[in-house]
């Protein structure tokens, strides 16, 4: 898949996943891989800066949780401001898809 097509959609993707519930980094990567049947792999080098940017914008929050094996895992959760931002972005995304479909036709 052309990465240029995905540019700018990472926040929408991440917030959509986190709206389903808190997730940790590797879980996000595997969920993306699974839902795209492996056609898109979100790399750590792109994931964590995007998560930190969302956290800096106060759209998500992170917290540490100790696992049964004693290891700590950092989870990310959407905040109310993030849910509002996501709702707005979903409307924009729908308009964008409709506009492009007007040129290239339905998928």
Image (spheres, rainbow, N blue to C red):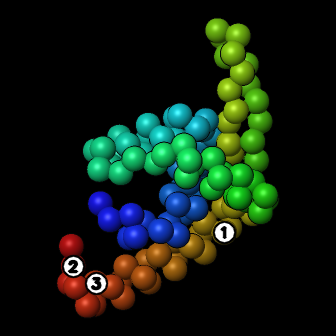
Disc 2 on helix, strand or loop? Answer: loop
- In this rendering, position of residue 71 left or right of residue 19: right
Name the residue nearer the viewer: 4 or 78. 4
Q: Is residue 1 left or right of residue 68?
A: left
Residue 106 bears which disc, if any? 2
Which residue in the structure is indicated by mark 3? Answer: 101
Give the spatial CA distance, label 3 vs label 1.
Answer: 24 Å
Q: Earlier in the sequence, mark 3 or mark 1?
A: 1
Indicate the quadrant where residue 44 lies: top right
Q: Is residue 33 visible?
A: yes
Circle 3 crowding by C-alpha within 10 Å: few under 14, some 14–19, many from 20 = few
Q: Residue furthest top?
A: 69
Disc 2 versus disc 3: distance between alpha carbons? 5 Å
Which residue lies at the image location 52% right of the left edge and 60% below the top edge?
Answer: 10
Up-down relation of residue 34 to residue 70 (above or below): below
Q: Residue 103 appears at what percent x and percent y? A: 25, 90
What is the crowding at mark 1: few (fewer than 14 residues within 10 Å), some, or many (at least 20)? some
Residue drawn at (37%, 43%), measured in percent from left and top? 33
* Left or right of 32 in this view: 23: right
Residue at image coords 33%, 85%? 100
Mark 3 or mark 2, which is nearer the start of the sequence? 3
The N terminus lies in which quarter of the figure? bottom left
The x, y position of residue 56, in whole percent, is: 79, 58
Residue marked by disc 1: 85
Residue 54 in which image quadrant? bottom right
CB within 8 Å, label 2 to label 3: yes
Does residue 80 appear in the picture of this structure? Answer: no
Give the Cα distance between marks 2 and 1. Answer: 27 Å
Q: Give the image location of residue 39, x and y in percent.
A: 29, 50
């Amino acid at each position: 898949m052309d990465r240029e097509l995905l540019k700018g959609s990472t926040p929408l993707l991440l917030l959509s996943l986190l709206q389903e519930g808190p997730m940790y980094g590797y879980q996000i990567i595997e969920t993306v891989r699974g839902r795209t049947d492996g056609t898109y792999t979100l790399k750590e080098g792109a994931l964590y800066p995007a998560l930190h940017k969302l956290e800096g914008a106060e759209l998500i929050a992170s917290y540490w949780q100790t696992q049964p094996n004693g290891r700590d895992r950092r989870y990310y959760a959407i905040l109310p401001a993030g849910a509002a931002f996501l709702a707005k972005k979903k409307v924009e995304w729908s308009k964008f898809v409709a506009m492009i479909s007007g040129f290239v036709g339905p998928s």
